[in-house]
Each structure stands twice: as C-alpha cells, then as structure tokens.
Amino acid sequence: MYSSIIYKRFFLFGFCLLLCGCKKELDSAYEWKTIEVTATAYNSLAYQTNSNPNITAFGDSLKPGLRYIAVSRNLLREGLTHNTLVKIEGLEGTYLVKDKMNKRWWNRIDVYMGTDVKAAREWGKRKVNISYRVKIENDSLKP
C-alpha cells in the first residue's frame, strides 16, 4: 500500500512537471507588444451600437461582466485580431478582442462596460498603453 502511494505521488509530480514544461513552451511561442492608443468605453445598448447590441462585428455574444474590447480596424493589421489577449493600463486583468469599430476610428480601443453607462462615462476618453499578445513568427519554419 505504501508503494502505491509513492507511485501515485511520483506520477502526479511527473505530470505536473510535464504541464509546466508545456505551459512554458506555449508561452515562448508568444510575445507581448505595447502601444499607445486612445481608449473610450461602450455599452451593449442599441443607441450606442445597433438594433442587436449584444452581438459583435465578429459574431460573438456580449455578456455584462466579461472583459472585452473593440479595436479600430488598423489595429487588426497590427496583430490585435479576434480573441487576442490585451492588458490595459489603469484596468486590472486581461481583456479579449471581441469586436471591431467603425472604419472611421484609428488607433483606438473601446472597452466594453456591459450596461453600466455611468462607468463608461466615468472612463471617458483617454490615452493609455496597452500590451497585447501575438504569436512569434518562426522564420525557420518558412519555406
């Protein structure tokens, strides 16, 4: 019985090491880039978006309480594509790119604030640094 407990602990320890190694390998496939953007906020309300305010331009459903952003279309070309992880100066946690803004906006993000219009107004418009995760291009894999 004692040997089976040791075996289980050894197996668990090995499995944890394997997971840590995989996570490190996954993390090394990405890098974080930082840029300055103009940040505003928006709500999922028809007068701010369209007649279906809970559906994004990518087709995702918005749910109050989740950390999402919309990005101007030029930022899509910079690597801020659908589901990119983003850290926003002045806000805790990470956000996901789930929406894209009207073509008239440039170098801009819109932070999703559910239906809390007061929070969106308090955020206002400001310049912030954002960091976003992009996949590292591996030149050795190119033909």
Image: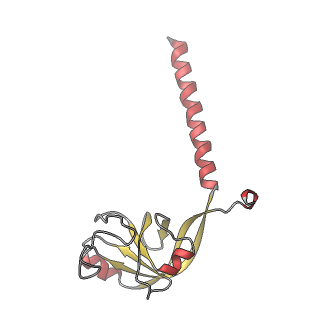
Q: Whole-percent x and y of residue 31?
A: 62, 63
Q: Position of residue 4 (x, y in %)?
A: 52, 15
User: Is residue 23 shown above or below 67?
Assistant: above
**How many marks on residues?**
0
Please say if 133 is above or below 15: below
Q: Position of residue 82 (x, y in %)?
A: 47, 66
Tell me if 89 is positioned left or right of 23 in this view.
left
For the point 55% across and 19% down, the residue is 6
Question: With 15 as the anchor, is 39 left or right in this view?
Answer: left
Q: Residue at x 56, y 77 (%)?
A: 35
User: Quarter-wise, where is residue 34 in the image?
Assistant: bottom right
Q: Residue furthest bottom?
A: 104
Q: Nearer the viewer, residue 134 or 3?
A: 134
Q: Quadrant of residue 112?
A: bottom left
Point out residue 107 in the picture as x, y percentages from the top left corner: 50, 83
Residue at the extreme top of the image, as rendered = 1
For the C terminus, which image quadrant? bottom right
Q: Residue at x 31, y 81 (%)?
A: 122
The colour scheme applied to this rendered structure is secondary structure
Tell me if residue 96 comes above or below residue 28 in the rendering. Answer: below
